[in-house]
Image: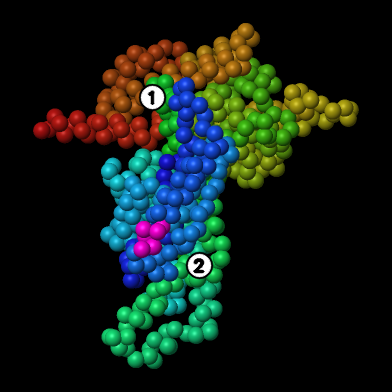
């Protein structure tokens, strides 16, 4: 990650000061035709970096500095960690090694501890510009029995030139910086409590006589306490170097650039939105402090809601017999039962699998979810009790869970009972031979004829029944079919929901989309269900464009 992490402190005598910073130095890429630098060149680079660090540190040393403004002595070489995979070096010292970075970090330090303050003075804030870089700052207090108000003010800043990257990393940075800050605060609190037990400073200050002439000297003596003294952590700076280096490496590897041919698909947008929501929820849990019952209730609701996100487990991670693909599932269930099950999946009905093997049920959901857009999938892989259809359209149950009467009699659900087959022999059976282990009974109150159905279902059946097509080719064919119908869904959503056209105009659009004719009722039902899988970004983009057009016409 092309960024820099710094720990800053507001000194009562000298104002905002940078205490410690960690930066990533990428290895130079040799130009074509040039020789790769040898070890002597690398040693020269290290010596140059050390000289620059010492020069910067010495320049600051000449200024008026107290113990509270200083982390490492001028003679200290700093800390270096090397990533063996990428060759990136993570360097830590009191100040950056480059003069340009020194001024950028200095400005970020001053702004984070002066004018750019969040409500309550503790917490995260974002600021910056294209010229001086963008800053993610988290301010916090450290307990000190000798300080004014018994606390000192610090901040951790992350400086980068890429605004979008830094904003997208907000939940990740917030979660892990809070862990570092809480560790510092807890360690300093123990030292503070022990000092207060020995000599309570509040009583000493109330009983001491105040003199304007003596006050500056008192403040000068109390201000010269380093963070190492406040925490009694002898390896504090080495520990911060490890934390900051890991933060830069992990934050840089969690988001990667990928070359996309054309616009991102709806599935990609939905996955990004879900990941962002989960990271924000995790940040919210980490930031809850003493919320009591309300905080615990909201956290339990968030955990419960997160349980209903589809667990996209890899097939190879599942233990025991499992379905390999849609074609494998079709071979096990049979053509008629598979078509009935697929029809319920495409229509958005609740698909319930009940059995004693969670891995088998999970594998069935993993292959069936490929029939739907990601935004339409809401699954509970395995539950000890029934969940309503509005919570999930894929539900796995243990064999002893009863199905409510209103669900059994509903035409909007299908039940697959997985029964164990009694075997007279004890010979081992391969995972592929699922029929020798289980029996599948499919039941539903919907008497849908198997020869009818949406156009998409018929095309899927043709692809699966063609033995000349491999499983990989069938998967790509299914992906193309999903994109084709998602484009139809976008047109219908724009026409009916956004523009608010009437039924006659909508019927003309359906004819244009090829959704009329045989299976028209199922086609329309499928399109309406798949509308729920559109990303929030796409919907908001359409609504914004329509409102902008209306304002232009009114003007």
x and y, in percent, of residue 164 in the image: 36, 40
* Horizontal side, residue 32 vs residue 539: left or right: right
Label 2 sits on a secondary structure element that is: helix
Q: Residues within 10 Å of mark 2 (few under 14, many from 20)?
A: some
Total labels drawn:
2
Residue 244's disc number: none
Residue 263's disc number: 1
Quick one: 449 or 141, which is closer to the camera? 141
Quarter of the image with the N terminus in it? top left
x and y, in percent, of residue 444 in the image: 60, 29
Whether the magenta-drawn stretch holds residue 38 is answered as no
Quarter-of-image position of residue 266: top left
Quick one: 71 or 533, which is closer to the camera? 71
- What segment is highlighted magenta in the picture? 57-62
- The dominant secondary structure in magenta is helix
- Please say whether residue 59 is visible from this viewpoint: yes
């Amino acid at each position: 990650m092309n960024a820099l992490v710094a720990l800053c402190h507001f000194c009562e005598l000298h104002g905002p000061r940078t205490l410690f910073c960690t930066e990533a130095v990428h290895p130079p890429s040799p130009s074509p035709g040039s020789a790769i630098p040898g070890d002597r060149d690398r040693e020269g680079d290290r010596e140059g970096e050390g000289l620059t660090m010492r020069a910067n540190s010495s320049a600051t040393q000449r200024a008026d500095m107290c113990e509270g403004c200083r982390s490492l002595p001028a003679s200290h070489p700093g800390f270096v960690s090397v990533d063996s995979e990428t060759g990136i070096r993570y360097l830590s010292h009191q100040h950056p090694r480059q003069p340009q970075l020194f001024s950028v970090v200095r400005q970020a330090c001053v702004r984070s501890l002066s004018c750019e303050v969040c409500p309550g003075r503790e917490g995260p804030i974002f600021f910056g510009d294209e010229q001086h870089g963008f800053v993610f700052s988290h301010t916090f207090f450290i307990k000190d029995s000798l300080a004014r108000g018994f606390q000192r003010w610090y901040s951790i800043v992350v400086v980068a030139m890429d605004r979008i990257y830094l904003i997208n990393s907000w939940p990740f940075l917030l979660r892990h910086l809070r862990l570092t800050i809480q560790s510092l605060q807890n360690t300093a609190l123990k030292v503070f409590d022990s000092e207060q037990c020995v000599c309570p400073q509040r009583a000493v200050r109330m009983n001491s006589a105040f003199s304007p002439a003596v006050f500056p000297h008192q403040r000068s003596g109390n201000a010269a306490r380093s963070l190492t003294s406040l925490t009694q952590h002898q390896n504090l700076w080495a520990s911060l170097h490890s934390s900051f280096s890991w933060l830069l490496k992990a934050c840089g590897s969690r988001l990667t650039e990928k070359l996309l041919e054309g616009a991102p698909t709806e599935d990609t947008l939905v996955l990004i939105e879900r990941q962002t929501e989960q990271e924000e929820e995790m940040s919210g849990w980490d930031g809850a402090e003493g919320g009591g019952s309300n905080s615990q209730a909201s956290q339990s609701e968030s955990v419960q809601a997160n349980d209903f996100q589809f667990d996209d487990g890899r097939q190879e991670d599942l233990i025991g017999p499992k379905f390999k693909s849609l074609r494998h599932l079709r071979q096990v269930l049979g053509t008629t039962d598979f078509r009935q099950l697929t029809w319920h999946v495409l229509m958005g009905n609740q698909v319930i699998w009940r059995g004693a093997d969670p891995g088998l049920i999970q594998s069935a959901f993993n292959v069936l979810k490929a029939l739907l857009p990601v935004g339409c999938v809401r699954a509970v892989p395995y539950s000890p009790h029934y969940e309503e259809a509005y919570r999930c359209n894929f539900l796995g149950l243990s064999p002893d869970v009863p199905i409510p009467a209103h669900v059994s009699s509903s035409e909007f659900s299908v039940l697959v009972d997985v029964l164990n087959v009694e075997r007279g022999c004890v010979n081992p059976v391969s995972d592929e031979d699922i029929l020798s282990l289980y029996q599948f009974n499919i039941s539903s109150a919907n008497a849908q004829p198997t020869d009818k159905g949406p156009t998409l279902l018929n095309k899927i059946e043709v692809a699966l029944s063609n033995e000349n097509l491999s499983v990989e080719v069938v998967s790509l064919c299914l992906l193309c079919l999903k994109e084709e119908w998602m484009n139809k869904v976008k047109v219908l959503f724009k026409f009916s929901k956004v523009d608010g056209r009437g039924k006659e105009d909508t019927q003309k659009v359906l004819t244009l989309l090829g959704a009329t004719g045989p299976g028209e009722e199922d086609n329309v039902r499928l399109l309406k269900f798949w509308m729920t899988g559109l990303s929030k970004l796409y919907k908001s983009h359409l609504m914004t464009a329509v409102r902008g057009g209306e304002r232009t016409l009114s003007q």
